[in-house]
Amino acid sequence: MNQLGYIAFLIIGLILGLIGGGGSILGVPVLVYIMGYGAEEATTYSLFIVGLTSLIGAISYLRKGELSAEALFEFALASMVSVFCMRKFIMPAIPQELHFFGIEFSKHSLIMLLFSVLILSSSFSMIRKRKPNSIRQIKMDEFYRSPLGLPFTIILGICVGMITGFVGAGGGFIIVPVLIFILRLNFKKAIGTSLCIIAINSLVGFTGNIGTQEINWKFLIIISLIAIVGILVGSLLSGKISSAKLKPAFGWFTLLVGIFIFVKETFLS
């Protein structure tokens, strides 16, 4: 099944290169259902892969100056601390078997059920059509303080860090709206800053597992390199394929994946 998993990660990288995001959220289902890893181990590997691929994506935005250092500092610092604490202290403390209102379920099922909710939310964000940026949004090039204040921004950062730490996914579909509507960044700067935040959070979260979990470095590096090859190929093809048409189609596919995970962990496990 490893060969099928390698092909899947090549496709994930290809999708990332073509539409600029979203594909990495399929990393955990591939690791769990195709390659046979447990949910906790899969989320650890996913953090490394998501962090590395997001970092590659962020470099092009950094070169163009489409990144807000202030937003990055205010939002990423809080989320970075929370994602590290989540992986280092909270996740290992969660028992393998849980009981809730007389219902018994495993830690694996809890992670995958919450992941299914995340992937369903992500699919909706890709399916729905976005309105084009207004003139006001296009001219709004620089960051200014959130009208709800710095404490609210920090709380949002902590929440995103906890989500990233628990399910091993970047949460870009949450971060981008926060950066646009709360921190008032324009769309391109929000994307660039989001990729940078995801890269920092994911890689810092991954370090939280070093020493507490056995990591197959050879496998992890191979998977990451395959995904990067996919990204490079997808980037070359992106000018020939419409991402506007591809993104909703991929959104419908992730919707089916999310439903499959929810049904399997709820009724078939």
Image (tube, rainbow, N blue to C red):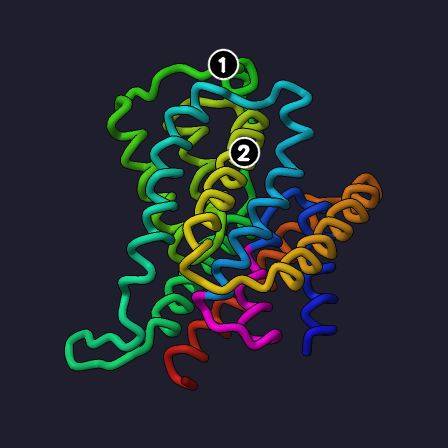
Amino acid carrying mark 2 in the image: Cys
Q: Main secondary structure of the magenta part?
A: helix
Residue 74 falls in which quadrant of the image?
top left
Residue 130 in picture, x, y percent from top left: 54, 39
Q: Quadrant of the C terminus?
A: bottom left
Which residue is under mark 2? 196
Determine the image quadrant of residue 180. Answer: top left
The quarter holding residue 179 reads top left
Q: In this view, does 122 lie above or below 186?
A: below
| The N terminus - image quarter | bottom right
Above/below status of 43 relative to 108: above
Q: Position of residue 161 (x, y in %)?
A: 37, 44
The residue indicated by pointer 1 is: 142
Q: Is 184 placed above or below 116 here?
A: above
Q: Which residue is drawn at 44% across and 62% down?
A: 213
Q: What element carries label 2?
A: helix
